[in-house]
Structures are given as structure tokens and as C-alpha cells.
Image: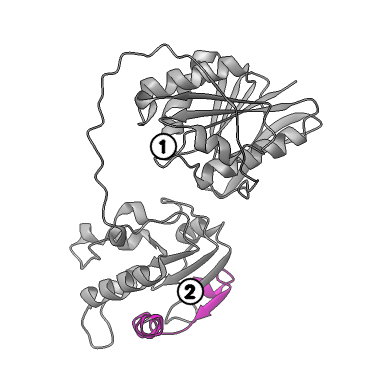
Amino acid sequence: METILFLAFPEADGSLSKAALETLAAAQQLSASIAGSKIVVGLIGADIQSAANAIAACGAARFLGVSGAEFAQSRYATDAAAAEAIAKSAAATIILAPAGSRANRALPGVAQRLGGRVDTHATAIAAAEGKPSISRWYYRQRMEGTLSRTTRPWVVLLESGCTPAYSGAAGTATVEGVLVALPTIRTEVAGFRSPPADQQTIRPDAKLLFVAGAGWTKKQPDGQAHAAEAEQLILGFLGKTQASLGSTKSLVDLSGEGQAVLQFMTHLNQVGQTGSTPRHAKGLATCCHGEEPHTVGWRFIGERRAINLNAACSWAQGKADVLYVADAFEVMRKVNALLG
């Protein structure tokens, strides 16, 4: 019989992230497909009761928690100790957690402590004839593999955007506190520094991904480059729509070639074979040609549209649902004016 432990770290306000709720839904689906299995919820944070109440109707057999000021911040020593204690208390055979930075850092070490195995970047987990297996992409999302393990406990970190989030009713959950032998704490969190909301360009939960290509910094019909105007148009659109910003490799590499660049663009924005593979509902590519190394990163975008002056570019070869043959500067000026 499998005991499936859903392990999560509540946010600073006590809520569970979208990625955590997606993982909980995956745990429910897995439990439903394995006869005799049960779900145990494990929560780690400063205050976990509100998070437990939010998922009280999830059907978990037990709610386990480790709470306190020492567990409020992401720290390997405390997170690993808490996760290990919860896993042992639950007698977990499969541990599911959202693949956030906190879990990705701590849980591989927990698997080692428990004598188990860990798999990261999983995009699905299911069971056939009672045998669980996961799906995972390899070679920059060009090949999908399916694998299973007999070793227990099996720790699986699920990527966000692969499963609809849990949306059950809230209630009142009884959380069993788990005692943890507090390790030596060598680090102290002094505070947080984050950019203003209008400077944040990477938004994984945004409905739209706006991708800028190198054409934005090239010479325009008047023979001049207009990088400053390009920045205003792009940032204006992002501010009005709260879209996420992506880029092609050629654009983020321009700074090393001595060419005009968009000051807010970094390699973190890069989408494609050597960048990220986002999962937004819609995507709009501007001033890029839709070459294979770039479009492989669009594999999971729901609806793909592009703006390009070249009617024969790669976007037109079946890689975009809609191609607008137009000047991106003119189009975005008009779009920003309409968004007003």
C-alpha cells in the first residue's frame, strides 16, 4: 500500500502557491489510481494552520506540520530536518512536492537521508495497474521519457503548469505537530530585496508571454536603430497587460557584440533550446524569425502568434497559429494606444 505524502511550504501570507495546489491535485489523482493508497499532507512554515484549512477537504488521512519562526525562511538545514521528520512520521512511500526553489534545494538531500530516490523536473505522475510512473522531458524538451522506481521512499518534484490546481472547499483541519531536532543554524535572513512590481518582467503565472527578438534593435526603415523607443513600447505593453517577457538568444547576446541592447533584457528572459520552456496560455513573438532553437521553447504555449515583416519566416511554416506580416513598432504603438 502506498502512502503518498504531499509536502509543501506555505507562502509568507500563509497561503499555498498555485504550484503547490497543482501538486496536491496530482497527489489526489495518483491516490485514486492506486488501490488502498492514502494521502498525508505535510506542511512546513512559520504558521501552517491557514494553509491546512484551505485544503481541509482534500481527503487526506492526516495533516502533519512543522511550524515556528525557525522554519519561516528557506534554509537547507531546517527545511531538510523538517521534511525528514514529517516523512518518517507519515511512513511515506511516495513524496510529492512542487518544484520550487525551496523544495528543489532541500528534498534531494532528504531522499538521501531516508535511503530513497529523487526525481526532479517531473511533468506528470500517474499509475497503471497500481504501478506509479512519472513523465519527464529530456534534450531540451525534444524527447519525453517515462520512468518508474521500485525504491521507496520515492521523492518526486513536479513542475508547475502541468496539472489543474486543486480547488476544493476550505474547512478546519486538525494538524498534528511533528517534533524536529533543530539543527545548528549558521545562516540568518536579514531581509528581502526585490524589484518594484513594474520592473518585474518574468511572470510565470501570466496568461500571455510576449517575446522580443533581435529585430527590435536593428536599423529601421529610416536607417536608424530605435532601441530607446523599443524599450518604451515593450515596457508599456508589459505594464498595461502584466504579460511575461521572453527573448531570443540573439537578442540577449547582443551586448557581447557591441550592438544596441534592451537594458531590461537578461539571459533569464531567454526562451528556447538554451533557455526556458514556459507554459503560458498564449504567446506573441515579435521581431524574431521562429527558428527551431527558439521555437522549441514554445512547445507548451497554448496559442502562438507572431509579428514579422518577412512573410516567409519560419513562423509561417506551421510554427505559429497566426502570423501578422507587419512592422512590430507600428503594431505595438497602436496596441498600446488601444490599451490606453
Measuring 36% from the left and 73% from the top, which residue is drawn there? 237
Q: Is residue 10 left or right of residue 265?
A: right
Residue 264 found in image quarter: bottom left
Distance in Å between CA atoms under marks 2 and 1:
32 Å
Residue 86, numbered label: none
- On the image, the x and y values in percent for residue 220 come to 27, 83
* Type of the residue with mark 2: Ala
Measuring 48% from the left and 52% from the top, which residue is drawn there? 277
**Residue sticking out furthest to the top:** 181
- On the image, the x and y values in percent for residue 11 come to 43, 40
* Closer to the camera in the image, 169 or 311: 169
Residue under pointer 1? 101
Q: Earlier in the sequence, mark 2 or mark 1?
A: 1
- On the image, the x and y values in percent for residue 2 come to 71, 23
* Type of the residue with mark 1: Ser
Magenta stretch: give its range.
313-339
- Magenta span includes 31: no
